[in-house]
Image (cartoon, helix red, strand yellow):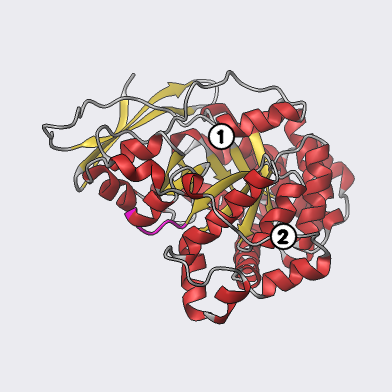
């Protein structure tokens, strides 16, 4: 199998292996290898191909009536190292390399084994126009229901075409990765605040996925961490639609989504810590004062302990991990998204026997109690945590990207249709 690309990072070599697929007219990534550039007496530096395996998501899916893949015997990762702290962490959490693809800072692939579909990703694909992925929009332009169902309304047809392009691109990615594809379905604040709108959009796009025979176990829909999102997740998960909840920044918020049955929630360690540095008064109300750990890490411990205490199956994706110490302190969280900089520092550090005793899974301990979550208590929790500001900023960015995508499609494609 050829080496498609090979690059160098300080202290590491990175090799991406791929094969050409005639069916998709593109490269299928098979492995991402990271290993030290120089050998060390105490380490075996031979590379091993360890692929990202979405084991915990699939186990949760099986309980909801979906078809699981074969079970893995141990936590695996798309990051390779031996005899270092990185190697130790791989045994405790799923480690996922967070990279920017082909120069687009907003196009984050979860290593070569998972992917994201969003307005910025599709727009980048169309601007780049060098891969078979542009066929996602080409196919959407001739999708008959968009013409038949939305005759006379250019805006409605445009919305339908973009939804179909998202699904087509998601299907292409699902074919070439072994893990999951997360698909953005909410691009504006009005939709984010309407459970009915979120559910309708998810059902509409799931029907499109069914039309192209993409198994529901291959993708998740990204749902914003709003109160309407809680209601939508409860409905969708009951229907077998896996939900990836984003912008979770408070324990009340996390508990509400866990109880609603979300497949996964995403937390943001570095952003949480930065917010509490600027808003110290809220450390007290959220039980984060007096901690010897950074507030972002302590928040993850609160969430994980609450999920364990309440026997909730929802998995935690920890992102915005700024340094090696935070990564070590998060040992045992379900998933960690790590930058290449943090990967390098972990790989350069010799293994320590005590790393499994300091992580969020091992520490447990007392956490604030979350009682019944009402709309009032939920929204109060948003305002007293980073959630309110972060959700609004995220939705504004999504809306900006969506408008840019619509403008591009309308001026560059539909005007010639």
Q: What's drawn in magenta, residue-wise? A: 320-324
Name the residue carrying label 2. Answer: 370
Which residue is nearer to you in this view: 261 or 311?
311
Residue at the image position 64 percent from the left and 66 percent from the top: 391
Numbered marks: total: 2
Taking the image as drawn, is residue 157 in sight? Answer: yes
The image quadrant where one finds the N terminus is top left
Tell me the CA gap for discs 2 and 1: 38 Å
Residue at the image position 55 percent from the left and 32 percent from the top: 54
Magenta: main secondary structure:
loop
Few, some or many residues within 10 Å of mark 1 (<14, 14–19, 20+): many
**Lower sequence index among marks 2 and 1:** 1
Name the residue carrying label 1. Answer: 173
Residue at the image position 51 percent from the left and 73 percent from the top: 275
- Judged from the image, the secondary structure of the residue bearing numbered disc 1 is helix
Image coordinates of residue 195 in percent, x first then y, are 83, 56
Image coordinates of residue 143 in percent, x first then y, are 76, 38
Q: In this rendering, is residue 393 above or below 58?
A: below
Q: Which quarter of the figure has residue 208?
A: top right
Taking the image as drawn, is residue 146 in sight? Answer: no
Q: Are marks 2 and 1 in contact (CB under 8 Å)?
A: no
Answer with left or right where residue 238 lies relative to residue 50.
Answer: right
Which residue is nearer to you in this view: 302 or 183?
302
- Judged from the image, the secondary structure of the residue bearing numbered disc 2 is loop
Residue at the image position 50 percent from the left and 43 percent from the top: 335
Image coordinates of residue 114 in percent, x first then y, are 52, 37
Image coordinates of residue 123 in percent, x first then y, are 56, 53
Q: Which quarter of the figure has residue 83?
A: top left
Answer with left or right where residue 48 lies relative to residue 358.
Answer: left
């Amino acid at each position: 199998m050829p080496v498609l690309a090979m690059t160098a990072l300080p202290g590491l070599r990175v090799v991406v292996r791929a094969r050409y697929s005639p069916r998709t007219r593109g490269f299928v990534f098979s492995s991402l290898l990271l290993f030290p550039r120089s050998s060390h007496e105490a380490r075996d530096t031979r590379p091993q191909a360890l692929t990202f395996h979405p084991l915990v998501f699939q186990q949760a899916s099986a309980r909801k009536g979906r078809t699981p893949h074969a079970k893995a015997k141990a936590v695996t990762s798309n990051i390779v190292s031996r005899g270092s702290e990185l190697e130790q962490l791989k045994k405790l959490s799923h480690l996922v390399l967070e990279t920017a693809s082909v120069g687009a800072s907003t196009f984050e692939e979860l290593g070569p084994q998972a992917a994201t579909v969003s307005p910025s990703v599709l727009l980048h694909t169309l601007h780049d126009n060098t891969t078979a992925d542009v066929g996602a929009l080409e196919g959407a332009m001739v999708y008959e229901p968009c013409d038949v169902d939305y005759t006379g309304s250019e805006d409605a047809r445009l919305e339908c075409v973009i939804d179909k392009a998202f699904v087509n691109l998601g299907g292409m990615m699902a074919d070439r990765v072994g893990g999951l594809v997360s698909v953005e379905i909410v691009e504006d604040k009005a939709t984010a605040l309407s459970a009915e709108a979120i559910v309708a959009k998810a059902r509409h796009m799931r029907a499109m996925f069914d039309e192209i025979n993409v198994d529901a176990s291959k993708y998740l829909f990204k749902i914003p961490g709003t109160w309407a999102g809680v209601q939508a997740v409860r409905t969708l998960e009951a229907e077998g639609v896996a939900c990836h909840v984003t912008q979770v920044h408070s324990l009340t918020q996390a508990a509400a989504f866990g109880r609603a049955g979300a497949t996964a929630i995403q937390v943001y360690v570095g952003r949480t810590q930065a917010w509490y540095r600027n808003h110290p008064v809220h450390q007290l109300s959220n039980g984060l004062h007096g901690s010897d750990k950074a507030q972002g890490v302590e928040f993850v411990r609160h969430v994980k302990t609450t999920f364990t205490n309440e026997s909730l199956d929802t998995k935690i994706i920890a992102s915005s991990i700024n340094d090696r110490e935070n990564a070590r302190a998060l040992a045992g969280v379900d998933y960690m998204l790590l930058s290449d900089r943090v990967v390098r520092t972990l790989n350069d550090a010799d293994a320590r026997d005590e790393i499994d005793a300091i992580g969020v899974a091992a520490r447990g301990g007392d956490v604030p109690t979350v009682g019944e979550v009402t709309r009032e208590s939920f929204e109060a929790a948003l305002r007293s945590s980073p959630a309110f500001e972060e959700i609004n900023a995220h939705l504004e960015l999504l809306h900006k990207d969506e408008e840019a995508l619509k403008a591009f499609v309308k001026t560059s494609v539909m005007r010639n249709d």
